[in-house]
Amino acid sequence: MPVNDQLLSLACGLFLLCAVGVLWRRELTALIGLLTLQGAALAGIAVLLALDDPHPEALAVAVAVGVLKAGVLPWLLRRILARVPAARETAPLVNVAASLLAAAAMTLLAYAAARPLVDLAPAATARAAPVGLAVVLIGFFLAATRRRAVSQIVGLLLVDNGIAAVAFLATGGVPLVVELGVSADLLLAVLVLQVLTTRLQAAFGDTDLDDLRELRDR
Amino acid sequence: MNPVPTGLAAAGVLAATGAAVALVLPARWRSAAVGVATAGVGAAGAAAGVAAVSGHGWRAEYPDVLPLAGVSLAVDPLAGWFLLLTGAVAVVVGVYAIGYAGRGGHGPGARGPLALLPVFVAAMLLVPAAADVPTFLLAWELTAVTSLLLVLVEHRHGPAVLPAGLWYAVMTQAGFVTILIGLVWLAAAAGDPSFAAIQDAAGGLSGPVRGGVFVLCVAGFAAKAGAVPLHPWLPRAHAEAPAHVSALMSAAMVKLGVYGIVRLGFDLLGGGPRWWWLALGAVGMLSALYGILQAAVATDLKKLLAFSTSENVGLILLGLAAAGLLASAGQPAVAAVALAAALLHAANHAGFKALLFCGAGSVLRGTGVRDLDRLGGLSRRMPATTALVCVGALGAAALPLGNGFVSEWLLLQALLHQATDAGTLWTVVAPVAVAVVALTAGVGVATFVKVVGTGFLARPRGEEAAAARESPPSMVAGMVLAAAACCALAVLPALAGPALDRVTAGLRAGPRPFEGGAVDLRLAGVGSTIAPLWIAAGVVGLAVATAVMARLAGRPRRRAAAWDCGDGPLTARMEYTATSFAEPLQRVFDDVLAPEQDVDVTPAAESAYLVRSVQYRRRLPDRIEARLYRPLIAAVEVAGRAARGLATGSVHRYLAYMLAALILVLFAAAVR
Amino acid sequence: MAAYAVAAGQAVLVAALAPWLLGWMRAVRARLEGRAGGRFGQPWRDLRKQLRKEPITPADAGVFFVAAPPVLMATSLLIAGAAPYVSTRGPLSGVADLVVVVGLLLLGTVALALAGLDTGTAFGGMGASREMTIAALVEPTLLLAVFALSTRVGSTDLAAIVAAGAADPARVISPVGALAAAALAVAVLAESGRLPVDNPSTHLELTMVHEAMVLEYAGRDLALVEWAAAMRLSILLGLLATLFLPWGVATSLHPAALAGATALFAVKVFALGGLLAAGEVFLAKVRLFRVPELLAGSFVLGLLAVLTASVLA
Amino acid sequence: MGLVRRIRERGRVAQPATPRPEPLPAAAGLAGSVQVRHVDAGSCNGCEIEVGQAFGPVYDAERHGVRLVASPRHADVLTVTGPVTVNMAGPLRTTYEAMPRPRMVVAVGDCARDCGMFAGGPGVLGPVGDVVPVDVLVPGCPPEPAAIVAALRGVSGR
């Protein structure tokens, strides 16, 4: 196996492990740390793919992705966290052990489901595409089962990272405009959630999103 | 002279004699005579089985025995394996029953129950020997009816016996109906009810017919085998039946369900598409996990053993599913290993479960209780039973030195063998199956540590256990036979290698699973070897050597009261009970088991902070039963109430119904 | 014949090394905690003394209590002799199977758990119950790691796996190897009763797992139990070392190769032990009911290792 | 990480060891390894604080082969503090009985020797020597950790 492929599979493994780690840990700071690492792994994947087929645009996308995912977004999340005292995911809707087993099941599902995709383009890069799919599923799962607003943002970011990874691996790169557009959307979402979290904290003294039910008209 | 028909004929004659003798002899001699006869039936059947697995085939037609269909018998290596297994269990149970049923002629020692015992065994021997659909169905139904009557033997002794019998009757008859429909459909489609003809014609049948037959029959067979979710009769019937009947049912009769699946799936239909085996594997994994989790938290000894039966049947079904899946993925060598694992595990389970149910019977007889929370201290009072149960528990826990280990090792070898060209499905299913087998094995170990540790060791937890008596010699002798079989299977499984080779070869499942080897079990398709004899010799030898050397180095041993933290002697109430032992596991699997717990704290009169007593109650309802069967039973009750409008009690009306039905049938025939 | 001598030599080596390893790990820990700590040889002195002291059987205990220490010791010795720590040319091919090794370890655990229940004390039962719970939950992780390792060679035979790894180092340093190593490492912590699953140096009965089972043992019984426990740690660390750092394991029976392999084995195990001891300074014991989370995590790692193995195959 | 820095800055806090004391002939069978079980037979807990210090990082009895254990079955030496009260006499005796032979008793503190200021008090039975045979006495009210360590070193011989 060429060195490049080895590095690529290493980056993909790290990418998936970070997602599993996000389910495993309860401390919100650790979550953000893992997200940063995952962003770096994603950027690594992008760089490796760009080096495979030297193209200035692809390299630019890779660098932009790295700055955004491993730099800007984690920084924003840390700022949110600084204002919110609850630093742990104390009681997720699904307990951690069950979440991890669910993650295992989703990984298996992703692997089985992505098989046709892999057969379509039997390159080394496409073989790793199920990793991205698994991360998308784990991200959704995280967003659906965690109470803290920050965990849910992290979940959404995982989904985005997963989509980006699938796109990179399956097609060898996303058009610059699409990727940047999606990322801008996401940036906006994070900023809105940041405001929301702060308000939530001010109103309820907590950032449990289940409290939002209280706002409903009866 | 061919030993197979001789053995079978001897079994038939002995069964008839035994039944007749039971009806004639006075109570004093009855159990001994019937026990010997039953053991004889078993020995004859086992001899026929041994002959069959060592290469003696046999087939015969008796067209005049039954009107219309006749009886057709044939014994091939597969049938021989199950004959051997059933016969061996019957030998153990026959010897055991001499003492167990010899209690002044009531309960299991009464005329009827004793007369039924050899008949039940003979019926079970007839099932694998059947060579056409009518004979098979006849033998199957005979087995079901005799076992049902035997389950009901102690119905005057406990209120739970009748409901248990009802559950068993309904489930086994429902299962019989699905098997009947399936096999008749298959025979109709093949044009001939004989197994040989079906085998020839099965390849040409359409996919939906084959699939439909497989689903119908496997549902019936799985119900008989006690696979989850068709298991609710099992913990009830096994717990409430007399111990020797439980042993026969759990060790032998349940295996007939496995036999049915093997016969149908691998022989008659000759393999099938992937979805058959995926479904079977899912049932197997569910049975294994759910069975062992329920066993882990059960405190009723016989109920625990019954759930463990579900678990082991699950593992066997998983092995069969793996064999089918691998065969359909073009991996015949590994498929043969998986099939051999399933068959060997069936034999191993027969050995240790017969032993354990007999042991449970001895405990029940010696103490009068089967609740582990009230047992304990039996290792002093019932040393022989304790030692024998330990042999069985070692096998059931699938630990090295026990017989269950070898077959679970084989199963794991088949599952671990990552065949790269077996397809995505296998890559995804195999790790899940390995994890399920591993978790099952782990929880199984905890379960049987609980059985031995809280049931037999330390101090008695109730006065019944404190007054325990050892069983009579014939019961111990029966258990010794079973234990000897377990030890043989544990240490020298290679002896079964040629037989298993012949069985798999007969099923055209693939090449021989084993490479020769007198002591090692060497796998042909997978590059692994196990040497149970060396493992056993190593552990025992090193343990003895260590003990001797340590003794030579040190001082003599002293016996003293257990360390009580300086505060008075320890009482039995301070011991861990079976419930407390299983509590951590119960908490870990809270979401699966959903126990109902109450804690009542009664404060003292002086202050709310001083506690006078704490009461803890726990109930573990069977969730699958509650979710699946309760609604079904409720629906049936509603339908029954509605149907009562049809039955007014008027004879004229009933006759009119019959007339209407007859006209309807004739009309349908005429139109067609 | 030479192969049997190698097996016996390995058993003696592990038995001799195990107390030293314990002493070394205690010393590392003491150093990091600012203490002076005992000498490396202290566990050996403890064992020598305990072997000479009087064993005591509780009044209500039976044969299980007396038999458990030799059985535990026997399983440890057998694994130590059979596993390819020094040479892949072991004579015990039907014993040196990864699944058999897992089973033998479990057999030792069961012997001790039954002994704990046999004493009839509350702590004995408590320790047995907890130990069996953990042992049951560790099994899936262990076997998935076995799965990932055996995929590459198509056999669960330890010697074959190690020989293949020693021949082709690139296979070992791969995502599969890393994931399987991580999964196995967590399982090893749980099996050998180290932090964060169990605290080997606790004096508080309510937090004990392994210690609670052996509270009744005295004299040579205790010596055997502690020696065997130390050996199990060496065995497990040795397995990690030989499976994931297989270099230097002798593939022949040449004396020089064997001597080099022995020295290298000791170095590897002590390095891993030092790492473990240093890591433990930073860890606290987790609650018993958080242990399933830890094991579920390592289970996922094992599963990923298996999947990666089949993807990259 | 903060802990790493703390470890690097703090280094070793253990005091340097004094020369090896004369070993007790009665303790020759222990051969440099002593496991200690502690019983508070009714002390004011002053001695407990000092015993705790003796096993702490500064005095660090572990470097002399002395370790605290969780069960008398594991112990060679019983350390006892305080005058023996009526209620603790029985547990003290059982603890001693529960220890495997050879076994020794180290009485720590003046109260353990002669009941100290509690002598003649209601509920006080007498000094430790009245209940179990005492091999070594550590005087002081409370004794210094160094004295306790020295006494234990005499037993361990290291």
Image (cartoon, coloured by chain):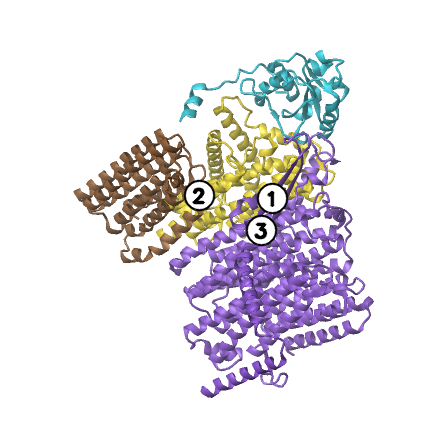
Chain colours: A brown, B purple, C yellow, D cyan
**For the residues carrying marks 3 and 2, which lies nearer the camera in this image?**
2
Q: Which residue type carries mark 2?
A: Leu
Q: Which residue type carries mark 3?
A: Gly
Q: Residue furthest bottom?
A: B670
**B264 relative to B389, above or below:** below
Same chain for marks 1 and 2?
A: no
Q: How far apart are the two marked residues, 1 and 3, measured between alpha carbons?
A: 27 Å
**For the residues carrying marks 1 and 2, which lies nearer the camera in this image?**
1
Q: Position of residue B348 (x, y in %)?
A: 60, 59
Question: Who's the residue at 36% across and 38% down the image?
Answer: A149
Residue C258 seen: no
Provide the residue designation for mark 2.
A93
Q: How many marks?
A: 3
Provide the residue designation for mark 1.
B598
Q: Is residue D15 left or right of residue A25?
A: right
**C221 relative to B619, above or below:** above
**B47 relative to B482, above or below:** below
